Image (cartoon, rainbow, N blue to C red):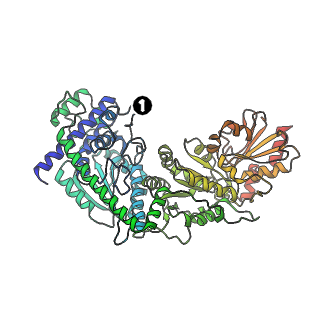
Amino acid sequence: MSKMDTKELQLAANTLRCLAMDEVQTANSGHPGVAMGLADVMAVLWLNHLNVCGSEPDWADRDRFVLSGGHASSLLYATLHLAGFDLSLDDLKQFRQLGARTPGHPERGMTPGVETTTGPLGQGIAAGVGMALAERMLAARFNTEGRTLVDHRTWVTCGDGDLEEGISHEACSMAGALGLGKLILLYDSNGITIEGATDIAMVDDTKRRFESYGWRVLSCDGHDFEDIEKALRKAEKSSEKPTLVICNTVIGKGSPNKSGSASCHGAPLGVDEVRLAKQALGFDPDQTFVVPEAVRDLFAKRAAKMRRHQRKWARAAKEAFAADPALQAQWEAFQKQETPDFRDLIPAWGDKPISTRVASGKILNAIAPVMPWLIGGSADLAPSNMTYLNGLGDVTKGAFDGRNLHFGIRELGMGGILNGLSNHGGLRPYGATFFVFCDYARPTLRVAALMGAPVIYVLTHDSFHVGEDGPTHEPIEQLPALRAMPNVCDLRPADATETAVAWKVALDRKDGPTCLMLSRQNLPVLDRTALASAEGLAKGAYVLWQRDPAKAPDAILIASGSEVALALETAKADARNLRVVSMPSWFLFAQQDEAYRNEVLPPAVTKRVAIEAASPFGWERYIGAEGRVLGMTGWGASGPAGKLAEHFGFTPAHLAALLNDYLA
């Protein structure tokens, strides 16, 4: 690298520093320290290595960039602006303001060029692992000896806080096991967190830690442009291992009085310190949001090069598609992921009771051949979750053409990786565990809901019917907790037939995560010749049965999942005109118009009983002040499932007694 190159990069990096300072100071809120410390690395990465195109931000074969430490968003926004993305200086001036395209932490879908929502530390690393995995899986499907449609890297920046979070261990361990050689993690090692020096809580040997995962580890002086360039070139060299680059930096680099200290981590530098920093960096202290023409030219040249690179890929893809129309059809199918009508593929259930988890497994294996983009796995519970796709191969190191993922016992890491797989595009991922352990994945499910990632969770063993494993494995509060999270579609099907419709709903959904809560125990297959169609699941709730539909019901029994059969059996044995409503999804029911909701639950009928093997929290929404709930007000217990049903009162006799007392 020539002295001129170094000089140009220094000006670019200092411009990024000043823009980040101005964003934070104008907002009087934010985190300038990391942005200033990481600016040198960002300048080298974006001007010399990262293959993205601001004018074509969704180019399929672009490199993916993730800022895992989302508090450094001011740096990312400044970089995106300079790199030619649709983000103006005025957008930068609105940093952290209501309705701005530059929120406090990066949000996918709000800012062009932001690949995933980050903020909760460590999740960006896991999402990056998912993106790198998606690249390898798609390359295995679309590349041949003479044709390369998929060939890009995933770059992730992280800090000390990201590596302190446990999710970094889960995701990076899996990345090493899979040998994701096109994943490059740039570790901004500045030794500072909010409370002070990292050694008050972290004395890890990061190099040895990542080597034990099976990673290649490099290091550089994060403020020496030649050293940074050398490290990034090495990182780009072909490897069967993911690469960690430890970039030793100074937080707040350029601030005369606050660099190297925690004081610049999470608060604006202050007007006076910003002026001093700009002076020290060679910028006019009286001007804000300044971009020197030389820096504009540098980024413009890079943008022009990236446009040529993108167009070259587009031409090659067009030629490949012209030579092989079937390839084009396959490529477009993977991108669009349209759900085919698979009703004729679903097995006939017969009269024998079957658990909804087993039914789900049969459905998955029936539909997977016609949806080749559908991939997924379990957190080491596939034989119990019934999520293994038979005969479709495993994804392992060096073999990415399979469709079964093995996440290991890593629910949180699994959730973050699912988000990355989904955000990458081209694949539709699902992940599975026991329902009670969805709490381990909850932070990543929350981010999926926030950014509208259509990941699917298969959550089995959904009640105290887990039985002998006891209360540690029996979900009680998980169902209302999921329902409380915006944009999460809850699906708790009553039988095998509803489960098939639930999978159709989940696959059709493209704007948020969906959770299928499935039973361990066998459930009767409801006779749809005498009952309402299971297609009613798509509306969230529907009238399953009523003794005399022509009259107003004396009371309404509302149930979900395994309790629907209990409600139905009890109602049929009762001489009163009872209505049974199957309510598998509060989320979907709330989306229906008022007329439909009132048709299912007539406002004039105030006698209502909800039956659900979960905490009753929230049911007042549908049963009103006069209603009753047969639910779980405490923990489960260890014992045979049948005995537990009697113990907790989930029997026809107990429900009948409750009704007699209630309706007397």
Looking at the image, how many numbered discs can be counted on the residues?
A: 1
Residue 297 located left or right of residue 408: left
- Give the quarter of the image for residue 424: bottom left
Could one spot residue 134 in this view of the protein?
yes
User: x%, y% of residue 525?
Assistant: 74, 60
Pick the residue in front: 576 or 413: 576
Mark 1 is on which residue type?
Leu
Q: Is residue 389 above or below residue 506?
A: below
The quadrant the N terminus occupies is bottom left
User: x%, y% of residue 465?
Assistant: 69, 56
Q: Is residue 462 above or below residue 255?
A: below
Q: Residue at x 33, y 67 (%)?
A: 240
The quadrant the C terminus occupies is top right
Residue 497 located left or right of residue 268: right
Q: Is residue 402 above or below residue 15?
A: below
Few, some or many residues within 10 Å of mark 1 (<14, 14–19, 20+): few
User: x%, y% of residue 417?
Assistant: 45, 55
Residue 644 located left or right of residue 658: left
Pick the residue in front: 235 or 174: 235
**Outermost residue, front direction?**
322
User: x%, y% of residue 278?
Assistant: 19, 33
Residue of label 1? 98
Callout 1 secondary element = loop
**Outermost residue, right direction?**
575
**Outermost residue, left direction?**
3
Pick the residue in front: 568 or 46: 46
Could one spot residue 150 in this view of the protein?
no
Q: Residue at x 17, y 34 (%)?
A: 283
Residue 305 located left or right of residue 95: left
Pick the residue in front: 637 or 257: 257
